[in-house]
Image (cartoon, rainbow, N blue to C red):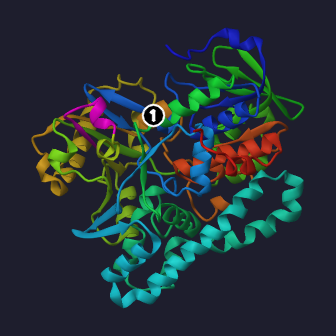
Amino acid sequence: MKNLYSPELTKTTYDAIIIGSGIGGLTTAAILSKAKKKVLVLEKHYVIGGFTHTFKRKKFEWDVGVHYVGQVNVEDSLLKKSFDYISDGKLKWNDMGDVYDQAIIEGDTYNFLKGRENQINQMIAYFPEEEKAIRIYYDLIKEIGRNYTMFFAERTMPFWLSKTLGYFLRKKFYVYSRQTTYDVIRKLTSNEKLMAVLCAQCGNYGLSPKKSSFAVHGMIVEHFLEGGNYPVGGASSIHNCLTEVIESNGGKIAVKAAVKKIIIENNKATGVELENGDKLHATNIVSNAGAHNTFNKLIPKEFQKKENTIELNKIKPSISHVCIYVGLNATDKALNLPKHNIWLYDSYELDVFQNTHLATVDSTSPLSYVSFPSSKDPNYQVKHPGTATIQVIGSYPFDWMKKWENDKWQHRGDEYEMKKEEIKNILLEKLYVILPQIRGKVEVCELSTPLSTKHFCNYEHGEIYGLEHTPERFDLLQLRAKTNYKNLFLTGQDIVCVGLGAAMFSGVITSVSILKRNVLSTISNYKLPK
């Protein structure tokens, strides 16, 4: 097995040990290794990449967490330059076209168009009497885009500096982060249909409008305004490119290397202990395992701090989900499958239906998200000729699967398999309603549950978006790169927000905190190899 952990790795003292090979951890590793630091990434499972990995069944292949990324088609965007820098320019993206998202609500169809003005004009065409509200709404989205950079830049500061200057860098962002999405939009319009359409992408952060922070809503909308893009070669090309950069610069990655705890001595992180008892040491320890896992599990009980755990534990884990992976024995072109994603809603009453669903055990998710990975990837037919793939995702609380959480993967019994079959058929029938042409073409259909997410990504409650993106989440000062343990750092989506781009950028933030240099300047000045 490539990159399999070896006890030989204990013989080296590293500049940085990174726990977890998700995009935040790999980005940190790539930047540090390019800065000539001795880096080791430890991954619990046998696959690298967290939510960027893919899996295969027969002649089909699916991603597990990368469905589209914004701004990487904009040449001078910081996100594009960052991805270029950490991949040495080898990571390529395919534009999804003029329509990147489509919402179908109670049978009504709404397209989200690439380009700010195009999208504004399209929304006005749908709701001509709401032009003023729509224009103000997109102005607010732009305002959030201007303010979040300073908010997250503040998270690179040491605590002493944050206490004196931090509030002034955060306060404009707080204007939006401390309000719910519903509260902000309701001030602009009373049109419930318009509100539902503007919030149709809320599945990207896992909370309905009355629960989510308007800041995360605004960041997600702004992120995709110039369209959606998909990695050429599929999601695995992301971690493959970063692995190559890390290893070519002397860094190491080890799989099947589960970390049991972070070693703390005199309030200083000095290394990690693996579940097999091996101990490895480094100048800096970086956790990409999530804030809850880091402060509540990886830090030994005797060294845990109330200022980390008590406030953090008030923020719940984000929603968990089920997903069907559909393999079709015909091409995307033959089946007329789109590149854009589809947000399929049972009702315009997003909050009411979601609350009812969450309160009713084994109920069907009122939102289904449909993605077409094979259609988005121009290289898919080269690797998997004559086939196509689709994914359908719905929310499903972890507690509804809790009775099987201690059973082994693939050995959870007949009752569990029957429940999976029931959910699979419900999602498949929803897919047939909007894409009747695929009936009879399905060769493979496999369902994953929140237990799959827990098993492969080590999230205790099967959550896919880390901490819930509520207004309270953005007030937590602990969600920053540098922790209150010397030489212990966080990276990953919890210190920024949900999404591949945000999780990648968390690695940039963490690298700035460790290197204490202007990494952003290096990235901004990076030139693609000729």
Q: Is residue 275 left or right of residue 371?
A: right
**Residue visible at 70% across and 50% down?**
525
Q: Is residue 43 above or below residue 424?
A: above
Q: Nearer the viewer, residue 65 or 318?
A: 65
Local SS, label 1 = helix
The percent coordinates of residue 209 (x first, y second) are 47, 69
Q: Is residue 360 above or below residue 186?
A: above
- Categorize mark 1 by other alpha carbons within 10 Å: few (<14), some (14-19), many (20+): many
Q: Is residue 7 above or below residue 332?
A: above
Which of the 4 image quarters holds residue 424?
Answer: top left
Which of the 4 image quarters holds residue 399?
Answer: top left
Per the rendered image, the range of residues in magenta is: 379-390
Q: Residue furthest front?
A: 530
Q: Nearer the viewer, residue 43 or 336?
A: 336
Q: Which residue is mark 1?
A: 236
Q: Is residue 318 magenta?
A: no
Q: Is residue 486 left or right of residue 129?
A: right
The percent coordinates of residue 40 (x first, y second) are 68, 24
**Residue visible at 56% across and 21% down?**
255
Location of the C terminus by quadrant is top right
**Residue visible at 35% across and 90% down?**
129
- Would residue 418 be seen by someone viewing this image from the given angle? yes
Q: Is residue 497 left or right of residue 196?
A: right
Q: Is residue 516 above or below residue 157?
A: above
